[in-house]
Amino acid sequence: MTQPSAVDHPTPLIVGDNAEARPIATLHRPGSGPMLVWLGGYRSDMTGTKALEMDRLAAERGLAALRFDYSGHGRSGGAFRDGTISRWLEETLAVIHAHPATEVILVGSSMGGWIALRAVQELARHPGAPKVRGMVLIAPAPDFTSDLIEPALKDEERRSLEERSFFEEPSQYSTEPNIFTRALIEDGRRNRVLQGVIETGCPVHILQGMCDEDVPYRHALKLMEFLPADDVVLTLVRDGDHRLSRPQDIERIRAAIAALL
């Protein structure tokens, strides 16, 4: 029986200086081959079903695996309302650099797909950074602040952003509402990737549910338009929702990761 990583004992990694310093909870499974890196979604953490299944696959194959919580998420420190794509990207790069590997496979879910696309761009600019061997993007939500949130803002939400610097909306996954800040939206514009050719330099496998109410499958089709130069596979799951966490979905995700090995 494969053993999970020491989920009760994450290692904190301090990211940022002075007032910006925050402890990022990380779980690293030693192993060989390319290191699998989990990049979670908005308000999710590293103990979700898909993250655990990625870790289990790594254990079965003897691979290294890396999971962590963004600041304001899970077991990491920092305030959730301080979170932006730039801030969470900084943490992603810091965690990867703190666990040296020759190659990595980035597995990004929802917002984590956006961060994965930005991370591959930034890693390519850093000499000595690991090579990204491949990417598995699950219901990816690149540019979701500008492409999905801003066009759908109601008048009262725009007023709340102007007057309170944030707005709330009910979440179908939690009793706590989703909170979207003006800083998140403004920073999102600076991190847009759906504006020109995205050169990942590696194979990409996108898995997208066609019954996804959070990130419409047409958004995945749009992403494909910006990945013309790479080996890209898109799997549309007709009855799949945003989470893609059913047993049959998990098998598809595991198969996509395994194909990159």
Image (tube, rainbow, N blue to C red):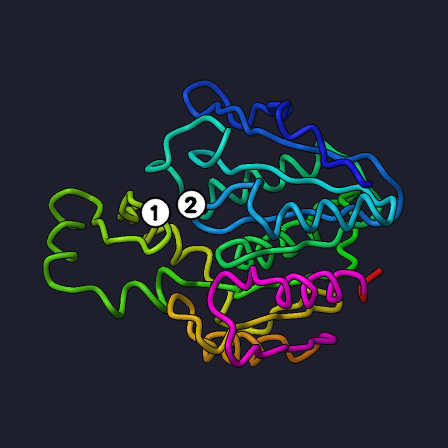
Where residue 232 appears, as percent x and y from the top left, is 69, 76
Looking at the picture, tell me which residue is in the foreground, 51 or 219.
51
What are the residue bounds of the magenta stretch?
230-258
Which residue is disc 2 drawn over?
43
Q: Residue at x 32, y 52 (%)?
A: 186
**Quadrant of the rendering where the C terminus is positioned:** bottom right
In terms of image quadrants, where is residue 83? Answer: top left
Marks 2/1: CA–CA distance: 10 Å
Q: Secondary structure at mark 1?
A: loop
Residue at 60%, 56% in the rendered image: 108
User: What is the crowding at mark 1: few (fewer than 14 residues within 10 Å), some, or many (at least 20)?
Assistant: few
Q: Point out residue 36 in the picture as x, y percentages from the top left corner.
A: 74, 48
Q: Is residue 261 above or below residue 21?
A: below
Pick whichever, 174 or 116, lies toward us: 174
Q: Are marks 2 and 1 in contact (CB under 8 Å)?
A: yes
Q: Residue at x 54, y 49 (%)?
A: 40
Residue 244: in magenta span: yes
Q: Quadrant of the N terminus?
A: top right
Q: What residue sits right under mark 1 in the picture?
A: 174
